[in-house]
Image: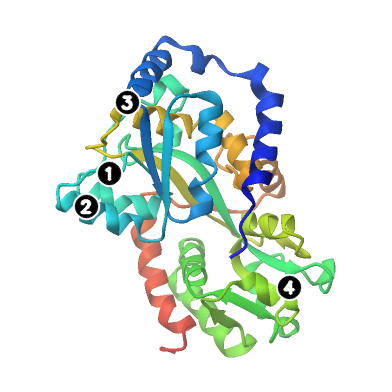
Amino acid sequence: MIQLGSRLVSVLLGVVFASSAAAQTAWKDSPAVRALYAQARQEGKVVVWGPQQREVDWIPQAFGGMFPGIEVQWLGDNNVITKAIAEARAGRNEVDVMHNSLGGIIPLNQRDLLAVPDWSPFGTTASNIELGGKVGLTNNLVYAVVYNKDKVKEADLPKNWTDLLDPKYKGKMVGSAFLLPRLIGFLGIVWGEDKALQFARDLVDKTDILVTRAPRESFLQSGERLYAVGDFEAASLFWASQGLPVDYVVPQPVAATQFGSAVLAKAPHPAAARLLAGWMTTPEAKRLRQTARFETDIRPGADSDLARKLRAQGGTIVIETEQNMAAREQIYTKANPILSGQMR
């Protein structure tokens, strides 16, 4: 997997620090945050886990630039939720903050492993808190069609997901075995289960889409496939930053995962955990994340470029929530064997 070099991350974050230092909002100097910071410095350490390295490895420098004196340790792994549950059962409490998708965090909530911190000192509003106050929402990943811009004309870009059934896309598409079924789950929220599952069947039967666990960017770079269906817009921007000739388009309806940060109920560094999780919901942290990892916020009220662009386009935007989780999971569980060729 291509990774953004630590030197480049340092340069990018340094630019943001320099440009925004004078624009710090009042929350940072509030008595509640200052008191929490003093306690966190006494603890001296905080541990954050996320689903992969690039979700969390930017945090130590970014957080340390605002709150120096606290060591940030991180783990990026697809199995961090399972690991956290196993460690809790064994009575070991190593992780302070979990940064993950809402769907990933819910199993921790179901086992009463999450605290209910006070998000208000960070200016985090009720509309940006989920799971009964246990998760502060941070960023979205938007499903897109990433394409080789050297070989694809703008006129050939899909405006709707169903456009991909056009014969002109046959033999030219690749999709992630993990992400594509989950996209179908989102589409099912808007279309209904029957239409969404039929769309999955048609992708397999009519388009010769290659569904794989291999990195899709390699197929785009080689020209073996021209469209990566259901990858994230942030992945496209990241690949482009590495010199790949790619761009993206977001078809209708817009589908987006929801990421957030949660404090573990038995966090070994409780003050530092609350400080880090709260900071991750602030506009400053969101800007730093976008600079370092191209991931942004498209929720109502968000002021990111992508949020404004999607609102201007109109149409339907469906974002992962606790309320739509069960229905979406039911659909993508059924879509998975269809897309893998195990079931018609």
Seen at 69% across and 60% down, the residue is: 239
For residue 247, above or below residue 24: below
Question: Mark 2 touching mark 1, by CB under 8 A?
Answer: yes
Q: Does residue 205 appear to the left or right of 145 in the view shown?
A: left
Q: Amino acid at mark 3?
A: Glu
- Per the model, the C-alpha gap separating discs 2 and 4 is 41 Å
> Which one is earlier in the sequence, the residue at label 3 or at label 1?
3
- Per the model, the C-alpha gap separating discs 2 and 3 is 21 Å
* Residue 304 visible (yes or no): no
Considering the numbered disc 2 on the image, is that residue within a helix, a strand or a loop? Answer: helix
Q: Which mark is residue 94?
A: 1
> Which one is earlier in the sequence, the residue at label 2 or at label 3?
3
Considering the numbered disc 3 on the image, is that residue within a helix, a strand or a loop? Answer: helix
Of 18 and 163, the residue lying toward us? 18
Residue at mark 4: 221
Could you classify mark 4 by the number of other residues whose Cα lies within 10 Å: few (under 14), some (14-19), or many (20 or more)? some
Considering the numbered disc 4 on the image, is that residue within a helix, a strand or a loop? Answer: helix
Seen at 56% across and 27% down, the residue is: 65
Residue at mark 2: 87
> Which one is earlier in the sequence, the residue at label 2 or at label 4?
2
Q: Does residue 129 appear to the left or right of 160 in the view shown?
A: left
Q: Does residue 35 appear to the left or right of 69 in the view shown?
A: left
Q: Position of residue 21 (x, y in %)?
A: 65, 20
* Residue 157 visible (yes or no): yes
For residue 236, above or below residue 69: below
Q: Position of residue 344 (x, y in %)?
A: 44, 89
